[in-house]
Every structure is written in structure tokens, then in C-alpha cells.
Amino acid sequence: MKPEFTIVIPAWNEEAVISDTILAVEKFFRKKNFELLIVNDGSSDRTAEIVKSLQKRYGNLRLISHKKNMGMGAAISTGFANAKGRVVINMDADLTHPLSKVPKMLSEVRNGYDVVICSRYVPGGGMKGIPKWRQAISIIGNAIFRLLFWSSIRDMTSGYRAYKLSAARRINLQSKRFEAPLESSVKCLKLGLKVKEIPLILGVRKKGASKYNYVKAAKTYIPAVIKLFIYRWFGRAEKSA
């Protein structure tokens, strides 16, 4: 039977937390018809080995591995391309995205929305435990993006989203790294997709190290923003398949 939804989790060197994440997801949705798809993005640690060991316990747990590290966006794209559920949800591997948001996301998709974004910048949303300087970068960056792209989406860079599978494949992410959520937001605007934002309080990871590097991210974000600006205002929206 086709799963109701697929949870896609990109994982790069997440041996410290991947077991906890899988166990938490499987426990939270134990009565649901879903699949959990881990995209191992060229990890050099025991991430893939841990996932394989847990596959013996969970028949709905799937693993796809990149031979080398290709980036978060590339891992999400791989997940979208291989998802079997009617709805596909992407979330981080570090449990900073609360699983309690998933039922609401699924409900909003059933209500007719193409994409549901867990947002820090709608009433009830925010950040907890995150350094003020990181919060400032996110707040200022999102304000700039909303102006550049004339966006009704408040949180342009949130990485916690649910999509109708058809919408995810129509968006057709090309970004390889951390700019992928921004590309998704801009394409939602360009394609006229129906988007709903629900509040998210984003926390910090308790295990393992963050893979986000602001210097490296800037090197890919800047050309990505230029490319997306041209696409938003001068490009041609892709047609439905």
C-alpha cells in the first residue's frame, strides 16, 4: 500500500544523533502509514551503518546513499525523487524540527495547500536558545529576501516543509546546498503554488555538530540569490508535468 507520507532526512556525518532521530520518528508515527527515507550524503562516519542496522527493526525505513558529499539541497532532491508518499516532508537530522508539527502540516496539505512551511516569522513562531547574532542574520536576511522577491512568505529560508509530491517535483530543486529552501520559496511564488505557513519555535541541536558554515554558505548564497532574482522577475515558470 502506498504510504500516506514520506519523511525525508538528509544526513551527513550524523552518527551522534541519527539513531535517536529515527527512533523518535518511528515512535511518534508508529500507528501511521508512512515511510522514513534517510539520504546519507556521503558520510565518512557510521551514519549509513547505523541506519542499516535499524532497517532490520523498521520495514518502512529506507536508505539512499550518495557516494560523496553533495550538499543538503542535493540530498533533499534525491529524497523527493525517490519518495513514495502522497506528501513529502523534509526535516533536519538533529531533532531541532519538532515532530509535533507534522500532523498540522499534513492537515493543511489535505485542505488544499501545495506547500506548508514551518515558519519562525509568523505569530507564535520564533527561535529559542540560538545566539542573538545568528538570529539577527536570519531576521535581516529574510527581510531582504521578502523585499527582493516581493514575497508573501515570511520565512523564506525555513528548512522544515511539507509538499504535495507533485508540487515538490514541479519545484524541481537545483540548489545543492543550504540555499535550497530559498529556491523552494521563490519557485512557490513564481509557480503560483498555494502556500501555508504555520508557527515554529526553532531550537538548537543537543548532539553532534552543526554543518552550517556561514562563510561557505555565503559563497553559494550570493550567486543563488542573483540567479533566483533573475528567475523571479525575468524567467519563465516551469509548466506542470
Image (cartoon, rainbow, N blue to C red):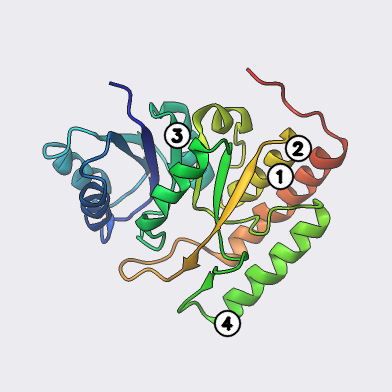
Kindly state the secondary structure of the residue where label 3 is placed. strand
Amino acid type of the residue tagged 3 in the rendering? Val
Q: Is residue 94 left or right of residue 25?
A: right
Residue, disc 3: 87
Q: CA distance from mark 4 to mark 2?
A: 32 Å
Amino acid type of the residue tagged 1 in the rendering? Val
Amino acid type of the residue tagged 4 in the rendering? Lys
Please, is residue 195 above or below residue 191 in the view?
below
Position in image of residue 71 (x %, y %):
50, 46
Which is nearer the eye, 86 or 159?
86
Res. 71 visible in picture:
no
Which is nearer the eye, 207 or 240?
240
- Asked whether the beta carbons under mark 4 and mark 2 sit within 8 Å of each other, the answer is no
Label 4 crowding class (10 Å Cα cut-off): few <14, some 14-19, many 20+? Answer: few
Q: Earlier in the sequence, mark 1 or mark 4?
A: 4
Which is nearer the eye, 146 or 12?
146
Q: Say which residue appears at 49% left-offset and 36% top-offset.
A: 110
Q: CA distance from mark 2 to mark 3?
A: 21 Å
- Asked whether the beta carbons under mark 2 and mark 1 sit within 8 Å of each other, the answer is yes
| Res 157 quadrant in image | bottom right
Residue, disc 2: 190
Q: Is residue 24 left or right of residue 198?
A: left
Quadrant housing the C terminus: top right
Kindly state the secondary structure of the residue where label 1 is placed. helix
Res. 217 visible in picture:
yes
Kindly state the secondary structure of the residue where label 2 is placed. helix
Residue, disc 1: 186
Q: Say which residue appears at 58% left-offset and 75% top-offset.
A: 134
Residue situated furthest left in the rendering: 56
Residue 132 badge: 4
Q: Earlier in the sequence, mark 3 or mark 1?
A: 3
Q: Nearer the viewer, mark 3 or mark 1?
A: 3
